[in-house]
Image: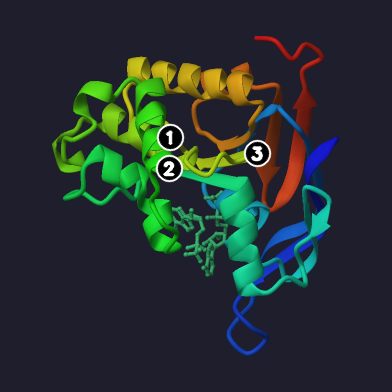
Amino acid sequence: PNIIELKNINKTYGSKTSNPTQVLFDLNLSFEEHTFNSIIGQSGSGKSTLLNILGTLDKATSGDVFINGTNTQEMKKNELSMLRNETIGFIFQFHYLLPEFTALENVLLPYRISKRPITKEVQDRAIELLEIVGLTKVKDNLSINMSGGQQQRVAIARSLINNPKIILADEPTGNLDSDTTEQVYELLREINKKYKTTFIIITHDRHIAEKADRIIEIKDGRINFDIKKSNNES
Ligand code: ADP
Ligand code: ADP
């Protein structure tokens, strides 16, 4: 079954009075559960806009976004926020970690932001996630003192704290060297297999894109190609 579906998505920035720019054109896309998808394309082609719409962080100008079968177009802000908390994890290139907070505190950040209580159970889950990403020893270190690869692992652990069905990642390996890129990719794949999490990642890294189950290229706000591998194992 499809976990996310986009129907006839158009996106225009600006209004009629302030020179509008259309950046997405009638996109139709659906993503199957448990798959690992990559989105590629030149800078400015509309990838981040697309990802933000997929994650309901931004609204399409027209068209429908279905998440887990629910049409999100008419949902209110607080309903969307709840849906995100229950369904979607985000990973961004520049982490958005709080530098003066520890790794553990950063993993728990989504709970603080949405003012949910940090119970013993939640705390234990955060510690377990830090173990999965290989950061047990440095869980109490300030993130400012961590390497880029370690910080990205913290961001990955944080994206999992809500047990998301979907992880949306914008250049998750964008500022990492090639060895660390490979390690982070392997980690994401492991999570994809272990938790059956659906991944949609924007990447400039050809090797990463080619290892995905599916490669979608966006060009000038349209799908240029969309290749699905017949074999899901890689
Ligand atoms: P990509 O992620 O592929 O680099 P983006 O989705 O960031 O592409 O941007 C697509 C186009 O939309 C670009 O021309 C960009 O300048 C424009 N754009 C992105 N965000 C905004 C915004 N908030 N307001 C106006 N234009 C924007
Ligand atoms: P709430 O309204 O409940 O505070 P938000 O709408 O701010 O929630 O975000 C919901 C989820 O999306 C959070 O878990 C947060 O980590 C993630 N998120 C939203 N925007 C961003 C962003 N710009 N960078 C990183 N994570 C984000």
Secondary structure under the numbered disc 3 in the rendered image: loop
Query: Quadrant of the image for the C terminus?
Result: top right
Specify the quadrant of the image occupied by residue 80. bottom right
Cα distance between the residues tagged 1 and 2: 5 Å
> Is 169 on the left-hand or right-hand side of 39?
left
Give the residue at mark 1.
Answer: 125
Specify the quadrant of the image occupied by residue 181. top left
Placement of 198 over or under 56, stated as above or below = above
Q: Amino acid type of disc 2?
A: Val
Q: Do callouts 1 and 3 mark residues in contact (Cβ within 8 Å)?
A: no
> Is 64 on the left-hand or right-hand side of 37?
right
Q: Point out the residue furthest to the left here.
A: 145
Give the residue at mark 3.
Answer: 165
Q: Amino acid type of disc 3?
A: Lys
Task: Identify the residue at image location x=35%, y=31%.
Answer: 127
Q: Position of residue 143 (x, y in %)?
A: 21, 40
Cα distance between the residues tagged 2 and 3: 18 Å
Give the residue at mark 2.
Answer: 122
